[in-house]
Image (cartoon, grey):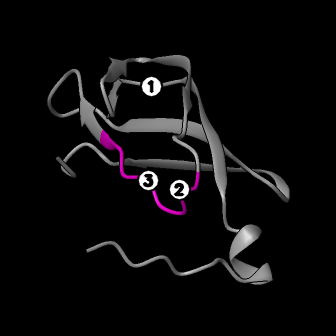
Amino acid sequence: MTTYFPMTFAELHRRLRELRFGTSTNGTIQIGAQSGTGNFTYTVPPRTGQVTFYVGRQTAGVATSVPFMVVDVCGDWQSTVGGGPGAF
């Protein structure tokens, strides 16, 4: 049995469109079937409100940072994820 719950107006604004990853510093990124060290875009499947990605380090004992931009129906916002030399 499939139950359909129509989306409210507020839920329409939570739809993600893509994540754009910039150049990482000592980082690796994995999201869905894509992976790399940065400078790629992940297109989010339709009707998605949440996405998980993983960040790893390339060299032990070195700080890691990955800049990224989230794009949804309301626009773009930037952030960075990472950690210091002992974070991973």
The residue under label 3 is 51
State the residue in front, 7 or 61: 7
| Magenta span includes 28 | no
In the picture, which quadrant includes the N terminus?
bottom left
The residue under label 1 is 25
User: Which residue is found at the position 24% from the left and 35% from the top?
Assistant: 56
Which label was assigned to residue 48?
2
Q: Quadrant of residue 28?
A: top left
Q: In this image, 44 relative to 75: left or right?
A: left
Look at the image and give the residue range highlighted in magenta.
47-54
N-term-proximal mark, 2 vs 1: 1
Q: Residues within 10 Å of mark 1 (few under 14, many from 20)?
A: some
Q: Residues within 10 Å of mark 2 (few under 14, many from 20)?
A: few
**Distance between the alpha carbons at the discs numbered 3 and 2:** 8 Å
Provide residue 36's location: percent of width, then percent of height.
Answer: 36, 16
> Which of label 3 and label 2 is nearer to you?
2
